[in-house]
Image (tube, grey):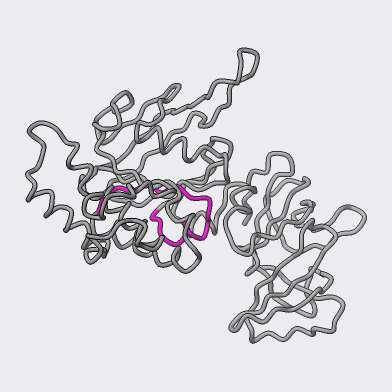
Amino acid sequence: MNVKIENLTKVFPGMDRKSAGVTAVDDFTLDIPDGKLVCLLGPSGCGKSTLLYMICGLESPTSGKIFFGEDDVTDVPPEKRRVGLVFQNYALYPHLTVKQIIKFPLENVKGDARLSKEEMDKRALEVAKLVQIENLMDRKPGQMSGGQQQRVAIARALVKMPNVLLMDEPLSNLDARLRLQTREEIRRIQRETGITTIFVTHDQEEAMSISDMIIVMKDGLLNQIGKPQEVYDDPDNLFVACFLGTPKVNVFKGFVKGGGLFIGDDKQSERILDVKGVDDREVWIGIRPEGFKVDKDGKLTCDLSGVDVMGRDISVVCRNSNAEEVIRAIISAENEVDRDAKTVKFNVKPHKTYIFDKETEERIRFT
């Protein structure tokens, strides 16, 4: 089932008549293809959960439309949208067994669509096997780990055979190892079922690893949409460049003059690249950690703070007066770095170097 969103806006009213409302989602337009796993990614307060709740019907939009396929579901109540929803807190009934929890949505179906008890049991077992908890059917939530409880919540959402599966930060309550394992399971389940899935997270590593497409949000606005690697390699603005990547992109103050890209200012600067076709202006310069090459004759000089050996890679930690934060350069362990040196010199890779307008922070592309 493809999901189409047209000019969707949600404004929450102020605390009183004198207070201005808060725009959580602002004129949002999006087309999610059938059978894809899509991540809504952004910092807390960016509107991603509000958007998810409007898609499922728990929140009503101030304006705009929501379509499932060709059907306008904007005013359709949640129970008639055929969506499955997995919350951040698992919301399992503590007095029920796993089997009873999974079957609960089926037991609430009325009329001709209601299944027989045998059909409910069969459907519950099928989804339990899919999420690999079929041996836990007689347990109660208090007898299970966090990862097992999350699988129960997913099974409960899937048992209705929804058109769309919605997940609101489902891994945030798990420890690091369980989070990694469970996100791999979610990806496997989504591929096996082929259900269109919308996954909300603030964790860029989580989004990059499991999604077919990521939607980066900020302040209720769509900043960029695309395949994870494409968005990482080709960010549209400074916010997207900084939000994706671990370690994060290194940002320098600089300027373009006479077809050259300089880090620094007019008083003291270093020319690091040729950037033909870019007008003279002040800019922000972003360099991915893997975009540095150690070179004794390099064009960029930094004060060396330390060298962290990470096995096949080395993290060179350094500083530059034109960068507000510590610079981290990831280079191959085959390179030698003099740990006792006061400075280190780099050349930079053009395809890992980005230019952003100083005022708008929008990307300026160069050849």
Q: Quadrant of the C terminus?
A: bottom right
What x and y, as percent, mark residue 215? Answer: 47, 46
Direction front: furthest residue: 95
- Which residue is located at x 27 percent, y 53 percent? 155
Q: Is residue 205 magenta?
A: yes
Would you say 48 lies left or right of 157 here?
right
Q: In this view, does 238 lie above or below 148?
A: above
- Which residue is located at x 89 percent, y 52 percent? 266
Would you say 176 lies left or right of 109 here?
right
Direction top: furthest residue: 17
Q: In this view, does 15 lie above or below 251?
A: above
What x and y, as percent, mark residue 15? Answer: 60, 20
What x and y, as percent, mark residue 18? Answer: 65, 13
Q: In this view, does 335 lie above or below 220?
A: below
Q: What stretch is highlighted in magenta?
A: 194-212
Nearest the eye: 125 or 31: 125
Q: Count all numbered tags in the image, as a single digit.
A: 0
Q: Quadrant of the N terminus?
A: top left
- Which residue is located at x 30 percent, y 56 percent? 140
What x and y, as percent, mark residue 103? Answer: 20, 48
Direction right: furthest residue: 267
- Which residue is located at x 55 percent, y 27 percent? 23
Residue 88 is at least partly visible in this image? yes
Q: Is residue 19 magenta?
A: no
